Amino acid sequence: MNIFRIRDHLSRFRVGIAGAGGLGSNCAASLARSGIGTIVIADFDILEPGNLYRQYYFTCQLEMFKATALKETIARINPDTLVIAHTVQLNPENIQMIYSGCDVIVEALDEVEMKDMLAETIQEKMPGIPLIMGSGLAGWGNIESLRCRKIDDTLYVCGDETTETTPDNPALAPRVSIVANMQADMVVGILMNKK
Amino acid sequence: MKIMLNNREEEFSIETLSVNQLLALRKLSFKMRIIKINGRLIPREKYESTFIKEGDNVQVIYLMSGG
């Protein structure tokens, strides 16, 4: 299948991204380049200088909401991708409304409690929608330990499932963006198999 | 009983186990994880009252901070 037919196919789908940090921003950029029709992003953070170490933002966007800045960036990458940006904190009450109509959801949150809350809420309120989680991306090296694991048709995990981010083992751009792009690739794979 | 634990067959000398008992027996000590039994995600508050039986497919996914 040539690139135009692939992009045409992907343009018919809507992808939800939970969090617009290192995983979410890099994943969104790749999905927009791949031609995804609609991306729904939720993040309530404001862009700070330290975020530029690994997140897909620019110095001129400092102090903007990340969700708003990412929408602006994606419009520059691919104006045909519609971005719906929510500057809210996700909770069990708003997740279904925010991601309604999404064909796939990418978990790109920082805290483990939030990752767990999202997975439980999607299973309960949006059963059957595939969720692609990120787990284990801190530090550098050991790239061969990064993997994408299909748990079942509704749950996939990308990362090494071992390293957690701490002040002494922070997330760095190369590994975070590899995992973000593993998630993006999983989205593409799921959607290319969808009629 | 025999169960599938993360795609590997595992055998236990007793016939049923709560999720918490399984975690203790297999020393699955990571504090944050997702557990699915036969495709169904088990909420944290049900680890004590949910039981694993012969033939169940149990998936444990470790959640690491960072995003």
Image: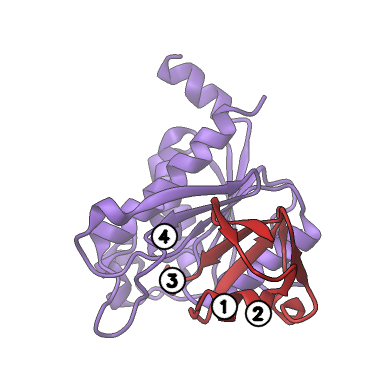
Location of the C terminus of chain B by quadrant is: bottom left
Q: Secondary structure at mark 4?
A: helix
Kindly report which numbered mark, 1 or 4, lies closer to the viewer in this rendering: 1
Quarter location, residue A37: top right
* Callouts 1 and 4 in the same chain: no
Mark 3 crowd level (few <14, some 14–19, many ≥20, 10 Å Cα): some
Q: Secondary structure at mark 3?
A: loop
Quickly name the residue at label 2: B21
Q: CA distance from mark 3 to mark 4?
A: 18 Å
Q: Are marks 1 and 4 in contact (CB under 8 Å)?
A: no
Please tell me the numbered disc located at residue B25: 1
Residue at 46 percent of width and 73 percent of height: A110
Q: Is residue A131 visible?
A: yes
Is A74 in front, or is B14? Answer: B14
Q: x, y (%) of residue A122?
A: 71, 60
Q: Colour of chain B?
A: red
